[in-house]
Image (cartoon, grey):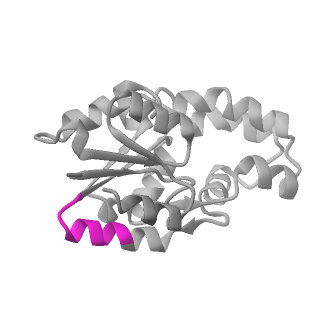
Amino acid sequence: MIKVIIFDADGMLLEQERPSVFLPRDYGINVEDLNSFFDGPFQECLVGKADLKEKIYPYLLTWNWNKGMEAFLNLWFTRKLYVNQELVGYINELKRKKIQCFLATNQEKYRFQYFLNQLDFANIFDKTYSSTNLGYKKTSHEFLSKICDDSKNIKKEEILFWDDRPENVKGAKNFCINAELYTSFEDFREKMKKY
């Protein structure tokens, strides 16, 4: 019997246009310049080894962004952001049935705090986990191990992991917990019937 369900944020609970799409289109920022940040220094921010505001500042200058740091982060965090309310409703039903619901996401600290405080994820979920706090991304066994260690008296076979990225689902299966690929709410609801 499943006692814990782990949910992903981006691509599952949240739908949002990626910065690599809207920044070049709407603000003329070069895609290669964006990629040099997101594939480079940003990766340290994701695992809590660097501060996003410090790492992104020199890039904002080269991107000719003149509206300030907070305006940039606000644009990034809020632009065309949609919360999957059907899924939130389903999570609330699961919690009423005494099934623990956790959030597990690869995020740097400022966006993660935005999720917890502005999107109310701190109240929607029983527990929340981020790569920035754990020091590892979701593909690593260390990430899932920390969640399992924190879930006392819960066996691996009593945990179900959901994610929209196949590599994260594969990592969870390799860690010997149940894992499913999220593609749509309808597919999610159908797959949940077997659990």
Seen from the viewer's position, the closer of residues 37 and 126 is: 126
Q: What is the tally of numbered marks visible in this picture? A: 0
Residue visible at 19% across and 41% down in the picture:
151
- Residue 121 sits above or below residue 85 on the image: above
* Residue 106 location (% of width, % of height): 49, 40
- Residue 96 sits above or below residue 56 on the image: below
- Residue 46 sits above or below residue 49 on the image: below
* Residue 64 location (% of width, % of height): 84, 44
Side (left or right) of 66 relative to 132: right
Residue found at the very far left of the displayed protein: 153
Was residue 92 drawn as part of the magenta stretch in this picture? yes
**Quarter occupied by residue 148:** top left
**Magenta-drawn segment:** 90-99
Chief secondary structure of the magenta span? helix
* Residue 190 location (% of width, % of height): 44, 64
Side (left or right) of 98 relative to 117: left
Side (left or right) of 64 relative to 105: right
Residue visible at 52% across and 57% down in the picture:
12
Was residue 149 drawn as part of the magenta stretch in this picture? no
Residue found at the very far front of the displayed protein: 194
- Residue 45 sits above or below residue 15 on the image: above
Seen from the viewer's position, the closer of residues 159 and 1 is: 1
Residue visible at 31% across and 52% down in the picture:
5
Residue visible at 47% across and 39% down in the picture:
169
* Residue 181 location (% of width, % of height): 50, 48
**Quadrant (top left/top right/bottom left/bottom right) for the C terminus:** bottom left
